Amino acid sequence: MAAAKKAVLGPLVGAVDQGTSSTRFLVFNSKTAELLSHHQVEIKQEFPREGWVEQDPKEILQSVYECIEKTCEKLGQLNIDISNIKAIGVSNQRETTVVWDKLTGEPLYNAVAAPVSPGPSDPVAVVRSGSSVPAAGTSSVWLDLRTQSTVENLSKRIPGNNNFVKSKTGLPLSTYFSAVKLRWLLDNVRKVQRAVEEDRALFGTIDSWLIWSLTGGAHGGVHCTDVTNASRTMLFNIHSLEWDKELCEFFEIPMKILPNVRSSSEIYGLMKISHSLKAGALEGVPISGCLGDQSAALVGQMCFQDGQAKNTYGTGCFLLCNTGRKCVFSEHGLLTTVAYKLGRDKPVYYALEGSVAIAGAVIRWLRDNLGIIKTSEEIEKLAKEVGTSYGCYFVPAFSGLYAPYWEPSARGIICGLTQFTNKCHIAFAALEAVCFQTREILDAMNRDCGIPLSHLQVDGGMTNNKILMQLQADILYIPVVKPSMPETTALGAAMAAGAAEGVGVWSLEPEDLSAVTMERFEPQINAEESEIRYSTWKKAVMKSVGWVTTQSSESGDPSIFCSLPLGFFIVSSMVMLIGARYISGIP
């Protein structure tokens, strides 16, 4: 029997999507952006102490090789010739810090990650770190207790004023970014100290560790990063696009351990066989794209024009707005960051970034803490039953209010309750809360940029909820546009890789995304109603302020940080509702 003929699809491009909880490898058709196959591997997080989060760099690397090999096997089963894979891009969790031995290839400590559990960061603690406001980038993550004292010590040494770091990097001094994690490793891990002294140490974010390892490691691996990841270290000057000598001296980081900074789209090196992991299906394929995850999503959404923005809906929300070739410094607590630089000789583009602390997390809270739903998917069904919150507003300020308020004394509340209110109304109010918070960030972006947003492009797991998407369009009073292909982060990395000079299989034109259709949600209420609902939300936000005093906040007593008003409103209101129904004979 003759062998099945291999499918001819034109040039293919692969993308490594390395996140905090899993690693994936995806392969796209460069002519249509169609996703052909992928494989995913979960990775572990370690919590050696409260507020510490670590990951094993070797496990991360092994997961990448496994995903590549398994995806290639799946392509073979589909009769797709893997020799058509012409390039590989890398998208990665940002800020996570790795230091390794360049002679042996062995990590000198676990990767130090941004904490994502067990509890939200305390904005008061970030303010105490010396920044004028908490880092907007920390608003959907958790405070890194490991490095807090490092930040406090550094803040005492800031020359002049608190703008020393921010004016160069676009970032406030915070536990979230890589420089502080690296400083902690240099201060506390003897193996790292010794390797630096002996000129054996290399530093990088996850992209650097992967590219160095995949291109040969100790046997000629390429030590590099791209501008988007470099811009999240607090060591990189976003104006000169170079490591900043003054910042390195301030953090006391030896510049010799830093990776070379490259554009987001160029050939960094070629894939090499891993004999120890018996992996080499894509040997010789160039790695030619590299973007931090949020920048990759911006590229994957084709947000190439000034004023175009995307919002990723996950545990929190990450909003990025392309500000073009100029740095825009926010007056509303947003971060200035590098969006992308798609070629060695191409211009750099910048973005404003803001984040919503509690998005998908509020749905999980309704499921795990209140038991209103059994699965996250049930929230849409409950909300659909009533189609309104019936005047109920939910402010999920579980750990204070972030941008644009920066109010650590706030705690969560549910208000506007009546005897008629039921769990469906609360579910609807929870979805509205995600949308109202998104509007507040976008309003801040509009004020900083001076360019009113014409529409919002969206991605992330929560975008499958059609009620949420329609609510978002109503509350923003602009269209919300969702791509049919949800893998925008991996797609962005693949696009950067395929467009690189010397590869040239992706032109970055809209017609190259012919397999990606768009679902558009238009506002279905009038502007007046949208504004009334938004102003009522703001009234509810003000009611959430002042529940925790500064003295209590700084005491560190965890009992102080419980959502007292939220629990009080829920319990007392439910008691009244149950009592009223019992008295009136309503079942």
Image: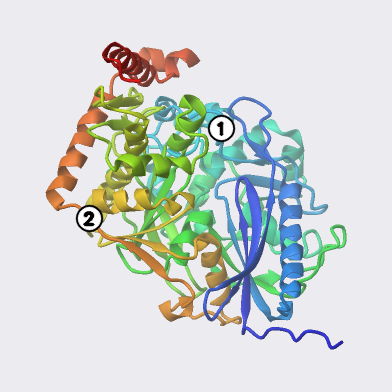
Q: Which residue matches tag 2?
A: 524
Q: Nearer the viewer, mark 1 or mark 2?
A: 2
> Residue 505 is drawn in which quadrant?
bottom right
Residue 265 spot, x, y in % from top left: 54, 71
Q: Which x, y percent locates residue 567? A: 39, 18
Query: Where residue 478 appears, x then y in whole percent?
Result: 24, 58
Q: Amino acid at mark 2?
A: Gln
Of residue 377 and residue 260, the one placed in the foreground of this image is: 377
- The mark nearer the N terminus, 1 or 2, is 1
Side of 165 where 115 appears, left or right? right
With respect to residue 425, does 239 lie above or below? below
Q: Amino acid at mark 1?
A: Ser
Question: Which residue, as the protein is rendered here, is positioned at the far left?
Answer: 528
State left or right for residue 34 relative to residue 271: left
User: Is residue 271 visible to us here?
Assistant: no
Identify the image quadrant of the N terminus: bottom right
Could one spot residue 43 in this view of the protein?
A: yes
List the residue tagged with mark 1: 117
